[in-house]
Image: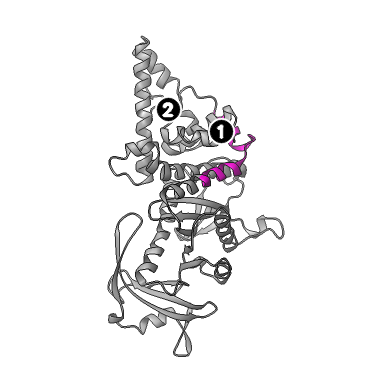
Amino acid sequence: MLPIVKLPSVVENALPRFAHIFNKAQMRHFGEYLTGLIVSENKTVTGINSNFMGHTDQSSKNHFLTEAEWDDSAVTQTRLDLVLEHCKKQGILDGVLVIDDTLGEKKGLSIEGADWFWDHSENRYAFGHPLVTSEYVTASFHAPLHYRLYEKEEKVPVGAFKSKIDLAIDLIHDADKEGIPFSCVAGDCWYFCDKIINELKQMQKGWIFASKSNRKIMVNNRYIQLSEYAKTLKKEDFRQVTVTKSSGKELTVWAFAKTVFMHKVGRIKVVISYLEKPFKGDPFFLVTNRKEWTIERILSVYVKRWPIETFYQDAKQKLGLADCELRLLKGIRRHWDLVFLAYTLLSIESSTGPLKNWLKSNVVTIGGKSRIAYSEILKSFLFWVHGSFSQEKTVDQVFEMAIIKNPQLRFQF
């Protein structure tokens, strides 16, 4: 890519919010690293550093991430303040808190905190960092909130181990303490368990989770599995329901709902649905404590779980969530913090801030917004070239400054 001579506006306009955290030199690295996560093709420390005109040695950015004295928690707090302010500006009084986990694979085997784990999305073991994260989803935007690194029990001090369920509960409490306006928590079947349900009951929060087919409900004075109960239903018990996903696309399913008593849970409402006509393919089970909700509302709320999947995909493929090559966990955590911030800025600032004027093509994806940010960088580079020629520099001089002196951009002759 072309050398970066000016930060894109989505980063430049956010910097004053973080001025209380960094000194002048740190602020430069902060802005450049954020920019690199958004537009750089190579999102390693070396790759990001090399993209900037007149860059210093990459060791400076390495030091910024792993050793420099700045308050990590203050960056997170400022990011969450942006989310809360956006909610206030948009009049958002409620949303859905989504909990899930992902595995960021690593190539180096000497990376602190990484280990071998089962990757359920790939159905294989992989070496990396498993993160449990929370996503805040509303009708108009969604943004990541917090994360927790899951570590095996034998890798942590005695008494300090926390399961993914424990970490999920921590994330729910984090969002609540921050004042994030949510009344319902959603998750897949892994997080549908007594521990989380009891915690949400104490917090007086609603919940919607996918459920495994072997969970038991009371039918005719005996417990049977959900899968067996589904077989007792008739085609006429189901009806077509259409809901709108966060992407704007519509999803039509055949669904049935009933309030039942579930073993070890109590009275809940269960929704049984098929993507095609009833009994074609496997049924999908949803459970919620919002027994008064209609099928349409239950499904509409649960599809808001999907943005956390798109966050994982975009954060890995577009923003470099798993690309950090640092060995020290402190630096890796700071990298994650800045990826979360980059995503939040693109999600929020592009709809209300400086990038808004660029969104004339109805760009909604993070990849599309990143390309728009890069178009600003291209424009800035052209201005720099024009200015250089105005100073009577030759083509060869401009070429040397822009390309030859940049090791990552050198052409192979």
Looking at the picture, tell me which residue is in the foreground, 294 or 119: 294
Q: Position of residue 65 (x, y in %)?
A: 58, 37
Magenta highlight range: 58-81
Instruction: Tell which residue pokes out farthest to the bottom in this image.
Output: 221
Mark 1, residue position: 19
1 and 2 marks in contact (CB < 8 Å): no
Looking at the picture, tell me which residue is in the foreground, 178 or 128: 178
359 with respect to 112 (left or right): left
For the point 36% across and 31% down, the residue is 376
| Total number of numbered discs in the rendering | 2
Instruction: Tell which residue pokes out farthest to the right in this image.
Output: 158
For the point 54% across and 44% down, the residue is 337
80 in the magenta segment: yes
Mark 2, residue position: 4
SS for dot 1: loop
Query: Magenta: predominant secondary structure element?
Result: helix
Q: Residues within 10 Å of mark 1 (few under 14, many from 20)?
A: few
For the point 52% across and 37% down, the residue is 17
Quadrant where the C terminus lies? top left
Whole-number angstrom distance, CA of label 1 to CA of label 2: 22 Å
Task: Please indicate, yes or no, whether residue 409 appears anywhere in the rendered image.
Answer: yes
